[in-house]
Amino acid sequence: MKFTAALLSIAALATATTVSYDEGYDNAARSLTAVSCSDGNTGLITKGYSTQGSIPTFPNIGGSWEIAGWGSPQCGACYTVSYQGRSINVVGIDRSGDGLNLSKAALNTLTGGRAVEVGRIDAQVTRVDSGVCGLRASKRSIEFMG
């Protein structure tokens, strides 16, 4: 009984999620002021990032269904996305109405260069610790810890 419950718990962590792409997330020079997770207490600018290219996982970034908009506590969430034997780590930097909406480059990595052809996939998505994506603590928390 405990074994079955443990298996069900693990299965719930990795769920099939729709994944699409938006070429706006491929622009390394795009300012984070253009996305939901820009500034404020939970913003990525507050953590020292200024452009999409400054995010450690770039171009593996995008919008997440968990990010409701500006000020979301889910800003900077890290996900492992797996599809047909390929896995990448992705940072959520923006709002997505449904599933994950990643850079075209990220979807190409997952699909073996077929992002345009497939357009959208159902992938296994697991939320993981932000350290897996190389994100650092905010400047404010560093100041108070020192």
Image (cartoon, helix red, strand yellow):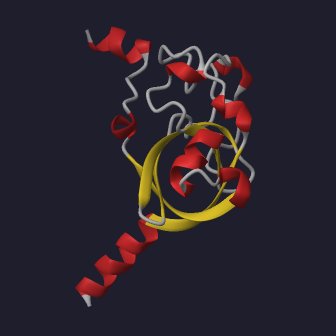
- Viewport quadrant of the N terminus: bottom left
Q: Nearer the viewer, residue 145 or 104?
A: 104
Judge left or right: residue 86 versus residue 61.
Answer: left
Q: Is residue 130 visible?
A: yes
* Residue 17 position by quadrant: bottom right
Closer to the camera in the image, 21 or 98:
21
Q: Is residue 69 above or below residue 55?
A: below
- x 52%, y 53%: residue: 110
Q: Residue visible at 56% across and 43% down?
A: 106
Q: Position of residue 92 (x, y in %)?
A: 56, 39
**Where residue 63 sits: x, y (%)?**
65, 42
Across and down, in percent, residue 118 comes to 70, 60
Q: Quadrant of the C terminus?
A: top left
Residue at the bottom extreme of this rendering: 1
Q: 112 and 95: which one is in front?
A: 112
Q: How many marks?
A: 0
Q: Position of residue 125 (x, y in %)?
A: 50, 59
Vertical position of residue 35 compared to residue 89: above or below: above
Q: Is residue 141 left or right of residue 54?
A: left
Q: Can residue 44 be seen in this snapshot? A: no
Identify the residue at image location x=66%, y=52%. Answer: 115
Q: Residue at x 49, y 42 (%)?
A: 90
